[in-house]
Image: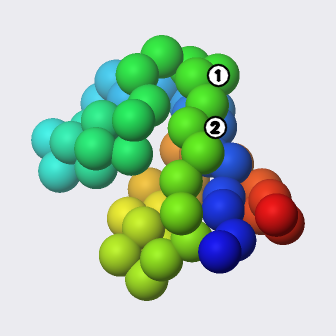
Amino acid sequence: MAKVKVTLKKSLIGHPDTQRRTVRSLGLRKINSVAILPDTPAVRGQLHKVEHLISVEEIAE
């Protein structure tokens, strides 16, 4: 199964609470924190919601 490497690139200050909770549920806390997640439709939906705050790289295993 493929995985994605997600990095928080921008601050959450001034963004809606739903976006803050989405970023937190992805396992990201501080700027430049990294999480490696499975590439599933649910995770892709979360990434799409906060795509302006993060960077995503695909990891092939």
Quadrant showing the C terminus: bottom right
Count of numbered badges drawn on the protein: 2
Residue at figure coordinates x 84%, y 66% from the top left: 60
Q: Residues within 10 Å of mark 2 (few under 14, many from 20)?
A: many
Residue at figure coordinates x 53%, y 53% from the top left: 37
Disc 2, SS: strand
Residue 49 visible here: no
Query: Where 60 falls versus 16 (above or below)?
Result: below
Query: Where 4 falls versus 11 (above or below)?
Result: below
Q: Position of residue 55 (x, y in %)?
A: 69, 48
Furthest residue in direction right, as rendered: 60
Spatial CA span between label 2 and label 1 = 6 Å
Q: Which mark is residue 7?
A: 2
Q: Which mark is residue 17?
A: none
26 with respect to 37 (left or right): left
Image quarter of residue 1: bottom right
**Three-letter residue code for mark 1:** Asn
**Three-letter residue code for mark 2:** Thr
Query: Where 38 falls versus 16 (above or below)?
Result: below
Contact, mark 2 vs mark 1 (Cβ under 8 Å): yes
**What residue does disc 1 label?**
32
